[in-house]
Image: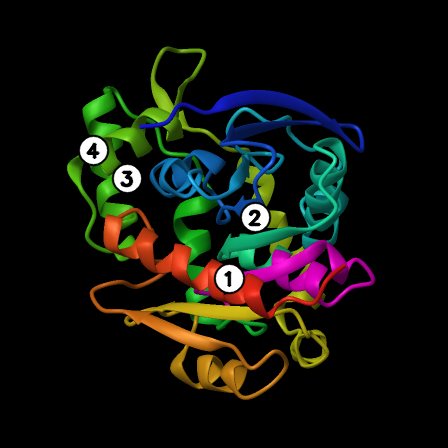
Amino acid sequence: MTAPHFHFVPVIGHEVHVAEWGDRQKPALLMLHGLARTGRDFDEAAAALSRDFHVLCPDMIGRGRSSWARDPEVEYSVEHYAQIATGLLDHFQIDRAAWFGTSLGGMIGMHVASSPEARRVSALVVNDISPELPEAAVQRILSYVGSLPAFDSFAKGEAWLRKTYAPFGPAADAYWQRMARTSLRRRGDGRLTLHYDPRITVQFTASAHELSTWDRWSRTRTPTHLLRGAQSDLLQPEAAQRMTQSGPRPDMTEFPGCGHAPSMSNPQDISLLRRVLVELLGQSAPS
């Protein structure tokens, strides 16, 4: 696997940890993770895509090795995350990038693509999220994100991750082992827990207005592709169909055997993502 370079980037008062893959002379690709995940979720995809792209995979604040919020109500919000994302592009002197976002990462991408900063997004791949979040699915996520578990061993932590994130779909053992290595941290008592600030769930109050944003979607014009886990409870079939018939009118790819959200870690899925990105960039208007 191609090795990344790691950076701690100062952005609007935060310290954001970024895994950087590939040659800076290639087209830029920003990959944004889900609610309680980290940028290392994309190790497999970023390593493969770095042959064609300059890939940035940040840990959003409150996750992984990035700093935690001082004011969670303000800083753990989609709007603030969007400012961090564009600030990272500024730091790396990137004017425009293709954006790939899983779940929360997709919400951030959709926010920027419908904002005055939309020109920063040359192409957008939205992974299993819509402008409308079903309450039952939100409550399911909150049931495991809102309180940090503790594990006596790495093996128990890995087993918890495999069970909790089984909806990510079929993945190699090496994927789950790598996920455990990059998702777990030691507590002060020596036990293991997950690598995020449990206060990140405040997003669902701080960004309550971002949980239904069809108006923003309707004015999005960025070339877009939609990915959906066939058994997803967060991107319902009706919402997915509405997305494909409004706004940027994206094509959609469904992944059998996946819920929320496809991991995009398998070679065939990464190859599909590469093809989608190349196609979208071919549709993108010059800056």
Image mark for residue 201: 2
The residue to which callout 3 is attached is 161
Instruction: Sort mark 3 into few (<14), some (14-19) or many (20+) by Cα contacts within 10 Å.
Output: some
Disc 2 residue type?
Thr
Is residue 234 visible to us here? no
Compared with residue 7, is residue 280 higher up or lower down, i.e. above or below?
below
Residue 246 x, y percent position in the rendering: 60, 86
The residue to which callout 4 is attached is 174
Per the rendered image, the range of residues in magenta is: 109-129
| Horizontal arrangement in the rendering, residue 105 relative to residue 151 (left or right) | right
Q: Quadrant of the C terminus?
A: bottom right
Disc 3 residue type?
Leu
Image mark for residue 135: none
Viewer-side label of 1, 2: 1
- Dot 2 lies on which element? helix
The residue to which callout 1 is attached is 125
Dot 4 or dot 3, earlier in sequence: 3
| Horizontal arrangement in the rendering, residue 236 relative to residue 31 (left or right) | left
Alpha carbon of mark 2 to alpha carbon of mark 4: how far? 29 Å
Viewer-side label of 2, 4: 4
Viewer-side label of 4, 3: 4
Alpha carbon of mark 1 to alpha carbon of mark 4: how far? 25 Å
Dot 2 or dot 4, earlier in sequence: 4
Front position in the image: 255 or 251? 251
- Dot 3 lies on which element? helix
Instruction: Sort mark 1 into few (<14), some (14-19) or many (20+) by Cα contacts within 10 Å.
Output: many
| Horizontal arrangement in the rendering, residue 112 relative to residue 4 (left or right) | right
Residue 134 x, y percent position in the rendering: 48, 73
- The residue positioned 63% from the left and 21% from the top of the image is 8
Front position in the image: 267 or 195? 267
Dot 1 or dot 4, earlier in sequence: 1
- The residue positioned 43% from the left and 16% from the top of the image is 187
